[in-house]
Image (tube, coloured by chain):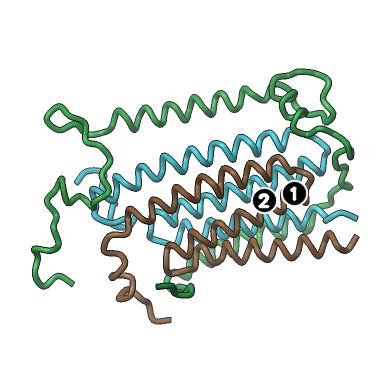
Chain colours: A green, B cyan, C brown
């Protein structure tokens, strides 16, 4: 069974208007500022090698940039590992065993079983 | 000449504002995540465009980081959504409004 | 060169159209598919900006990874929403 997409408009007007207002403010700021001309990359530059050299501060790249950018990714990876660790610590334990990830709407744990209820529609 | 900067900035702003509208409007937690992905892509378009504009490779490096970390964040977010589904029997963010249940 | 502007306008239209569809579609699976379309057209923009490596990473990671994750999440959290969706329609 396939169906074509239908849209849902009109349920929340105020956040949509807020987003449009934000877009109007950004448009006004962009259109009233002047930029220089595009410089672009050289035609035969090796961009991936330049990215690698810029990340570790190795000189001799075709396209220049800031050096030692791997610091940012290391800090971000440490933050990501900390987030995963916090989720692992917060997993609930019942009777000494860790509750694993279930995707059944809580039926096995909380006994929610809609088939038994009557008048539920 | 090449595409002027204001065109790409407006594209990025449009994507970002559509993402903001999605975050504020929809109730489904998965749609929340997808709107955040739209906002991250808007920032990425900005990074890559100005990397080409200045002839500097820093912008492309940062957009690589953003792509990798956005993928990791979506993985974590989906894990949280599955736990939300288990405990609240639905992924409606307006129903899961208390810290304890 | 005018062709660059025309190509940019075409793919920008696809991107903005698909992302509007993401937040406005009623069914969440249609939203996920339209998000895939939006991410693919952003990858095309990256190719036009001389960033082919970023475009390849975008397709690999976002469309090939993140979208598959979202697909699994849509599949696992479906539940009774499928029937509730029809009765939830707001009269516009």
- Disc 1 crowd, CA 10 A, few/some/many (<14, 14-19, 20+): some
Considering the image in quadrants, where does the N terminus of chain B appear? Answer: bottom right
Query: Quadrant location of residue B10?
Result: bottom right
Q: Could one spot residue A12 in this view of the protein? A: yes
Is residue B72 placed above or below C82 in the rendered structure?
above
Residue A30 image position (x, y, % from top left): 75, 55
Q: Secondary structure at mark 2?
A: helix
Q: Could you tell me which residue is drawn at 14 percent across and 48 percent down?
A: A110
Q: Are marks 1 and 2 in contact (CB under 8 Å)?
A: yes
Q: Residue furthest top?
A: A58
In this view, C23 is above or below B61: below
What residue is pinned by disc 2?
C43
Q: Position of residue C84 (x, y in %)?
A: 29, 70
The residue beneath circle 1 is C47
The answer to whether residue A9 shows anywhere in this view is: no
Placement of A45 over or under C92, stated as above or below: above
Indicate left or right for B91 with B60 as reference.
left
Q: CA distance from mark 1 to mark 2?
A: 7 Å
């Amino acid at each position: 069974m396939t169906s074509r997409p239908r849209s849902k408009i009109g349920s929340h007007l105020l956040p949509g208007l807020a987003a449009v207002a934000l877009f109007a403010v950004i448009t006004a700021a962009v259109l009233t500022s002047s930029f220089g001309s595009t410089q672009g990359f050289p035609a035969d530059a090796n961009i991936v090698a330049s990215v690698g050299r810029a990340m570790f501060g190795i000189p001799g790249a075709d396209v220049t940039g800031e050096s030692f950018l791997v610091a940012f990714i290391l800090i971000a990876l440490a933050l990501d590992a900390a987030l995963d660790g916090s989720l692992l610590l917060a997993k609930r334990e019942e009777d000494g065993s860790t509750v694993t990830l279930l995707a059944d709407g809580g039926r096995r744990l909380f006994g929610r079983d809609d088939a038994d209820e009557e008048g539920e529609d | 000449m090449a595409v002027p900067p204001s065109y790409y900035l407006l594209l990025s702003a449009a994507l970002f504002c559509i993402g903001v509208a999605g975050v504020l409007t929809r109730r489904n937690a998965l749609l929340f995540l997808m709107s955040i992905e739209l906002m991250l892509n808007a920032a990425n378009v900005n990074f890559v465009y100005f990397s080409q504009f200045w002839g500097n490779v820093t912008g492309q490096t940062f957009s690589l980081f953003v792509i990798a970390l956005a993928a990791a964040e979506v993985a974590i977010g989906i894990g949280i959504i599955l736990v939300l589904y288990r405990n609240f029997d639905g992924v409606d963010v307006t129903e899961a409004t208390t810290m304890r249940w | 060169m005018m062709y660059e502007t025309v190509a940019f306008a075409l793919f920008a239209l696809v991107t903005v159209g698909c992302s509007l569809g993401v937040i406005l579609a009623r069914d969440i699976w249609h939203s996920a598919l339209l998000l895939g379309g939006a991410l693919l057209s952003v990858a095309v923009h990256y190719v036009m900006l001389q960033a082919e490596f970023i475009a390849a990473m975008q397709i690999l990671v976002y469309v090939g990874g993140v979208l598959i994750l979202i697909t699994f999440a849509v599949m696992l959290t479906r539940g009774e929403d499928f029937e509730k969706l029809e009765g939830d329609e707001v009269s516009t």
